[in-house]
Amino acid sequence: MDSAKITDLLSVGEPDGVSPDDPRVAGLAGLAAQMGAAPPTRDAPVREVMARLGDNWSALILKVLATGTFRHATLRRVIGALAAEGDISQRMLTLRLRALERDGFVLREAQPTVPPRVCYTLTPLGTALTAEFDRLLAWIEAHEAEIERARLG
Amino acid sequence: MDSAKITDLLSVGEPDGVSPDDPRVAGLAGLAAQMGAAPPTRDAPVREVMARLGDNWSALILKVLATGTFRHATLRRVIGALAAEGDISQRMLTLRLRALERDGFVLREAQPTVPPRVCYTLTPLGTALTAEFDRLLAWIEAHEAEIERARLG
DNA sequence: CTGTATCCAAAATGATACTG
DNA sequence: CAGTATCATTTTGGATACAG
């Protein structure tokens, strides 16, 4: 999207129009460039990963797996003990693990025994993601009081 | 949650039990401590903000607002031009802006004119959040190829 | 122009029962 | 134990019409 089109967009409904020097024009041009010719669709990694980190369970799953390797049932019990909502359903745990595995954040190792024993571990990529994610979490927690204040006032 | 309880949790279903020295015990104890006595509920800032950043529109709204102040209708047009999904519904834009305003990330200024003119701007807190968020986005984009590879292989 | 209300469709989540 | 299938419920999002 070029600057001329952006200027047009900003001008709609403004009787005096908008100057091409409006700082928003350059800002939006940069944003558009950053997003590339084809803006990220819902299944693009940036969108998908952010959606996972924002869903009900994936973030907690990552944080638990960051402490080591877990079997399916053990992971489920540990999450149930940590989460405010209580237990995660077996179905959701499987769905979330599959999504994390699919994107290369979690490694699944099944031993062909009876009964089966399946272990989940963070991959190096998953460990790195969790570390990055933790920075953002720390920022939010550091500003929690400010957010709560905005909610009240 | 103390280490004894964690050790118990990890021992369920393990014929040989689990040693209190299992590194996961210390890791989970740290995680439990970090989450506090009452784990964050769905409406806690950490959960709520992550949910917003992961939803369909809030991240883009923040990025656009990071370039300046926008009227409601202009913001809507700009988002429609940038998003892969096309236009955001008026309803969703209002809902998202309200949520961001509520948490102190966006400032809403209504001029009592006819027709009304309402401007939205990032607060300093919102600007700071967007900056932090951008770091995580940059990390994901930097590892996009790796994620795509995991999806294929 | 900004916003709300209403209705509807789609998606995420949960509960339960079942299989290997 | 790990996982799937099915169904109910909840949440989320979109379309439309309307009000100030």
Image (cartoon, coloured by chain):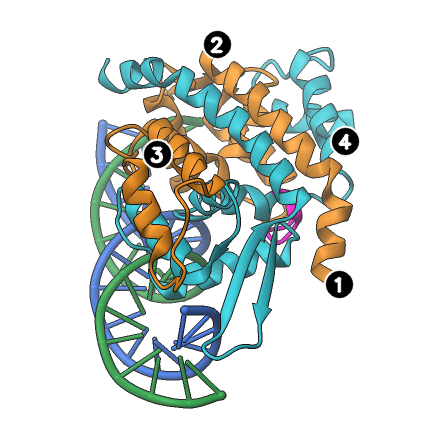
Chain colours: A orange, B cyan, C blue, D green
On the image, the x and y values in percent for residue A87 come to: 54, 44
Q: Secondary structure at mark 1?
A: loop
What kind of residue is marked 1? Gly
Which residue is under mark 2? A124
Q: Which residue is drawn at the image coordinates 27% and 20% (left, top)?
A: B151
Vertical arrangement, residue A124 with respect to residue A12, above or below: above
Q: Secondary structure at mark 2?
A: helix
| Tag in front: 2 or 3 | 3
Q: Which residue is drawn at the image coordinates 33% and 44% (left, top)?
A: A6
Give the spatial CA distance, label 1 vs label 3.
35 Å
On the image, the x and y values in percent for residue A132 come to: 57, 21
Category of crowding for the residue at label 4, using alpha-carbon neighbours closer than 10 angstroms: few (below 14), some (14–19), many (at least 20): some
Which residue is under mark 3? A32
Q: Which residue is drawn at the image coordinates 65% and 17% (left, top)?
A: B24
In the image shown, does A30 or B134 lie closer to the viewer? A30
Which residue is under mark 4? B33
Q: Chain of mark 2?
A: A
Specify start and end residues of the magenta stretch as a single range: B40-46
On the image, the x and y values in percent for residue B43 come to: 62, 54
Q: Is residue A66 visible?
A: yes
| Tag in front: 1 or 3 | 3
Which residue is under mark 1? A153
Upstream in sequence: badge 2 or badge 3: 3
Q: Is residue A123 visible?
A: no
What kind of residue is marked 3? Ala
Q: In the image, are marks 1 and 2 on the same chain?
A: yes
Predominant SS along the magenta part: loop
Q: In the image, are marks 4 and 1 on the same chain?
A: no
